[in-house]
Amino acid sequence: MRHKNYEKYRKIIDAATKVFAKKGFYNAKVSEIAQEAGIADGTIYIYFKHKDDILISLFEEKMQEVLDNMKQQISLESDPLKKIEKFALVHLKLIQDNKDIAEIIQVELRQSSKFMKNYHNIKFFEYLDLIGHIIQEGKEKGLIREDILPGIAKRAFFGALDEMSRFWVLSKKPKYDIETASRQISGFFINGIKR
Amino acid sequence: MRHKNYEKYRKIIDAATKVFAKKGFYNAKVSEIAQEAGIADGTIYIYFKHKDDILISLFEEKMQEVLDNMKQQISLESDPLKKIEKFALVHLKLIQDNKDIAEIIQVELRQSSKFMKNYHNIKFFEYLDLIGHIIQEGKEKGLIREDILPGIAKRAFFGALDEMSRFWVLSKKPKYDIETASRQISGFFINGIKR
DNA sequence: TTCTAATATGAATAATGATTCATTTTTTAA
DNA sequence: TTAAAAAATGAATCATTATTCATATTAGAA
């Protein structure tokens, strides 16, 4: 699919991002996406098999961007504890600069587990594993306590950031600025796990 | 509504819990809920205004239970740091013993923000505030650092627990047992915020 | 330029499932 | 015991929308 006419494929993805973010997957009409993209309803079915397929593709595209960006930013730091700080900051910045992505992650990440039992969200696991690897590295360098389980810690840290962004997405006026929130969260996470 | 015949009201709520948990709100048919409850489709509309109303009522009922249970359990501890440990343990236990509730919280808590912009989820905020109050108390007693912001910390802590339960709900075989997970999470949270 | 294949269109289809309501059953109280 | 009210039933309605497809447009090759 994605080769024929990449421009139009992108246009549909972008339109769908907006519409899904505003209405949620189930309340978004395919015709709205078409309208937002400035094309006919039927055209969508040349690029995507069905509505679900739009969501999955969109999610993977977005996650890939996020992933690439995060990897790049993290690679600039060498100290694992600094990497964790950076992760928090970059994640929350991303959410702030791109609420659509945040909403999609928030709602659709949960949806997908329900309406597509078989769709395994590889990209998301990769994202989680970025954190897992940092923690592993920290343990190896003796910076992080031996008893910390990366499988739990990575989820806890992601969950903390994710809940914070859920809050932002919902409230009109963010109560805390990115730097404060990110400093607090990575702050007590790091204090909590360091040797 | 909820006075006429509380038994049947409960029966519908219970049926809906099962069906929503299995299929998710949008894929759950009202007729399935009726069937599960052993009543006619139309009967549901005697007790609830519409499908959304079932979800909202159900959510509030469940949250009330969770809230009462948690308050009770926490009150048994006097040390704020112990209360935090207890919170994690009770939360995760609840999830394990009652996956239906977990799934509803996971998916519908997010949904609701989308499909009912006006529905403000008071019960959920109350739950979050339990954590907030504990942290406040800990600060007052000089057990928790002065610079910790309860508004951020409570969300981070809840988020950590919630992401952990998401993982459980999704995976067939839980990889970590409740005690380990809860000890880890409350462990590094407490280490992270204590003075 | 002209023909063909690839794309795009959007009106029509067709399935779905929430909600209603005329009818039946059950409960209440006189 | 009986009549009125309340509760329950489930078949019929009715709106909603994803998807299809016959037709039209565009692009590319010859």
Image (tube, coloured by chain):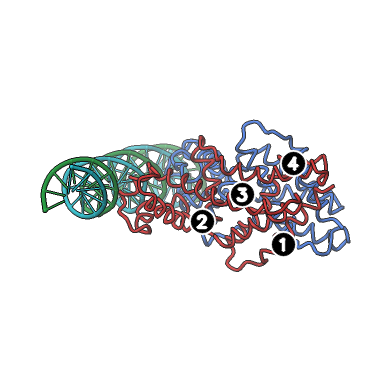
Chain colours: A red, B blue, C green, D cyan
Which sits in the foreground, D20 or A27?
A: D20
Percent from the top left, x then y, of residue C4? 18, 41
Q: Are marks 4 and 2 on the same chain?
A: no
The disc labelled 4 sits on which kind of residue? Gln
Q: Considering the image in quadrants, where does the N terminus of chain A appear?
A: top left
Q: Give the labeled residue for mark 3.
A: B61
Q: Which numbered disc covers residue B114?
A: 2
Judge depth for marks 3 and 4 and give the one in front.
Answer: 4
The disc labelled 1 sits on which kind of residue? Gly
Cα separation between marks 3 and 2: 20 Å
Q: Are marks 1 and 4 on the same chain?
A: no
Q: Secondary structure at mark 4?
A: helix
Q: Which numbered disc covers residue B151?
A: 1
Earlier in the chain: of badge 3 and badge 2, it is: 3
Chain containing the residue with disc 4: A
Percent from the top left, x then y, of residue A75? 67, 51
Judge depth for marks 3 and 2 and give the one in front.
Answer: 2
- Given contact means CB atoms under 8 Å apart, are the residues at marks 4 and 2 in contact? no
Residue appearing at x 67%, y 58% in the figure: A89
Judge depth for marks 1 and 3 and give the one in front.
Answer: 1
Q: Secondary structure at mark 2?
A: helix
Structural crowding at the residue carrying mark 2, measured as other residues with C-alpha within 10 Å and reported as few (<14), some (14–19) or many (≥20): many
Q: Are marks 1 and 2 on the same chain?
A: yes
Which sits in the foreground, A35 or B9?
A: A35
Q: Which numbered disc covers residue A136?
A: 4
